[in-house]
Amino acid sequence: MPPPGVCLDIIKERNQEDGMGTATDPVKFRGQDFYWIRDQCLKNRQRFIDGTFPPDNSIIGHKLLLPDMMARVKWLRPHKMVESPCLFVDGESIFDIVQGYLGDCWFLASVGALTFQKQLLNQVVPIDQGFGRDYAGIFHFRFWRFGKWVDVVIDDKLPTIDGQLIFVHPTNKHEFWVALLEKAYAKVCGSYSDLKAGSVSEAMMDFSGGVHVMYKLKEAPPDLWDLMNRAVKHKSLMGCGTPKGETDENVELPNGIVQGHAYAITGVQQVMSRGRPVNLVRIWNPWGKGEWKGDWSDRSSSWQTVTEEDRMSCLQICDNGEFWMSMKDFTMNFEDVDICCLTPEFLDDSPNQWGSSCHVGKWVAGATAGGCMKYRETFWMNPQYQVRVTSGPKGSDRPGSSNMVVSLLQKPDNGRRSLSPHHFIGFTLYAVPPELRDAKGKFSASFFNNSRPITETKAFMNVRETTQVFHLPPGDYVIVPSTYKPEEAASYFLMIFSNLQTSVGDNSAENHMTINKEIYSDYAASEHKSVFAQYSDQLKEVNAEQLQKLLNENVVTDMSSGGFGLEMCRSIVAMMDLSVTGTLKDAEFSRLWKRVQAYKDIFIRTNASHAGKLSLQELRSAIEAAGATISDDLLNLMALRHGSSSREITMESFVFLMLRLDSLKKIFKNLSDGKGMYLKEREWLYLSIYS
């Protein structure tokens, strides 16, 4: 039996702190270790078959192929298709790729851009594999997925019909790196059908782990070509897309451009034509054919107006899907440009270094899913990240320059790309006044109701990722990522890039659990004596059964909620029992009684609806009224562990919860060095069983 999920989360967090999930130490996807599996296959003279992504029609997915085609599919290893298969033939090239039956032009356009970045390609397609001596029918590929790199193992059985690959296929029939890469990405996304339709930026980010910036060409800055030129110099991946036509079909227009189609941008060049500079863009169609037919196309007379040197270095008259066009024609025929770079250095030609801060979080219904600013009563519940920007290198904080990039991604929770519900997401940024810059915990609703945002996502969209580039002068700010509507649960990944000196803190990550003693100091010790005398035994002690009766008859006002259960009372006795006898003496009960009365009063004051249960918003207020500050994650765990199915907390559950918080805090304080805690196995069992 695996350890509890909370334990697994802690293990994951520790592994990430130790460097796991980096490009050099990726997480093993689905726990599969490529090297161990390959060694076992070689030792046993077997060829690998991936049981987690079996080579059968189930991984093709729903409605991707017609029934008669599906019936003809056969899964073949490369050596069953050709003699002497290779991973690469004469290295990698954009011209190795020809799109197949699967509508994944967005993915293949990204692969095409990847072929121009050798270092990134070797990271995604490790070179320690092939069809040589160590061949065992197993391959692996690496992708960046929401903040961490994962190593994905596959077998090399590929879907074919009549011996031919159905999906992407190489121009050289002996070369298989692209087909295997496509299969590995299908595994990460769920199936081959999960690759149908998408944004080129998604795969580019998964190939690099970099920051993505998208420009709508109708709203493009006047220096867009200069930005693209700098992006090329900074080893970026670039893609672009055309607007859809009247249908979802990829219709080729008379000028050679395909509607609703993704392309790779493979270069930019400035040439002199008739004495004037012309900015050109080189573009590639993942179909492997089909090119622009206007000015600066392969057979355009425009090439006769440039020097022979420019013509020789740029022009290739071949229908291979790659072509040139002017920036003017590009902006008229294409819809957007996607640039993905390891850092946003291409945004500015200054030498300033960009730093980054990354955060994983969740929008939890009832707790941290507050919706956008339109929902003023709940907006403050969203996660909050306080950003402190101080002066950076000369010129980095000049007005008009870009010194901050914020990227927000929502993560699929069910492992299927196409089936994952994408909410409308965005973020809002506020300035924090000087008097609040050192405030602890989350800002309240009143702060946001009385403040105007400095910037916000222009339009909340149901996309995987949204990014905004802007300028911030030195100061303190708070970034609030959110879904458009409240109560929409999802996981997210937030990246903040800046070329200024910047620190980022999670306002909701404080875990202070010191209970304010003043809240129960006003309750006189003498008030408990008559109650204790009525329920204690001849030894002047109460056990768990007696305590249950005492609490239910003297504290609970409405037994419809079930009152204090026996197991709950056993835990309370264990928490307050200083002599480890299983009972509470007079002094121990006195300490308990004062706390119970105080927590009951807090519950009544906080329960604004008077429904006898606290919502998660009320629970946070009640815990803060008791003197404790908790993180969003901890609040969610409390609701899961101590709440009803609707995550509401009864009075007795609240009292028990606060007693547990106080007890756990004291255990850590007394057994730790202030930073961490080491326990022997016997000590851990001792604490866990009787607490």
Image (cartoon, rainbow, N blue to C red):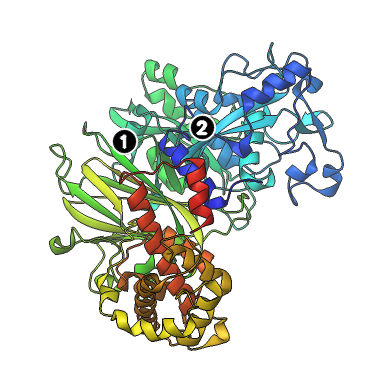
Residue under numbered circle 2: 26
User: Quarter of the image holding residue 44?
Assistant: top right
Residue 402 horizontal/vertical position (percent): 25, 45
Task: Pick the residue in front: 600 or 444.
Answer: 600
Q: Is residue 169 above or below residue 490?
A: above
Q: Amino acid at mark 2?
A: Pro
Q: Which one is earlier in the sequence, the residue at label 2 or at label 1?
A: 2
Q: Is residue 57 left or right of residue 455?
A: right
Q: Is residue 597 above or below residue 100?
A: below
Q: Is residue 205 left or right of residue 478?
A: right
Q: Is residue 641 above or below residue 473?
A: below
User: Quarter of the image holding residue 447?
Assistant: bottom left
Closer mark to the observer between disc 2 and disc 1: 2
Residue 20 horizontal/vertical position (percent): 47, 34
For the question of whether residue 35 can be seen, the reply is yes
Alpha carbons under labels 2 and 1: distance apart: 27 Å
Helix, strand, or loop for circle 2?
A: loop
Residue 507 horizontal/vertical position (percent): 31, 58
Q: Amino acid at mark 1?
A: Phe
Query: Outermost residue, front direction?
Result: 538
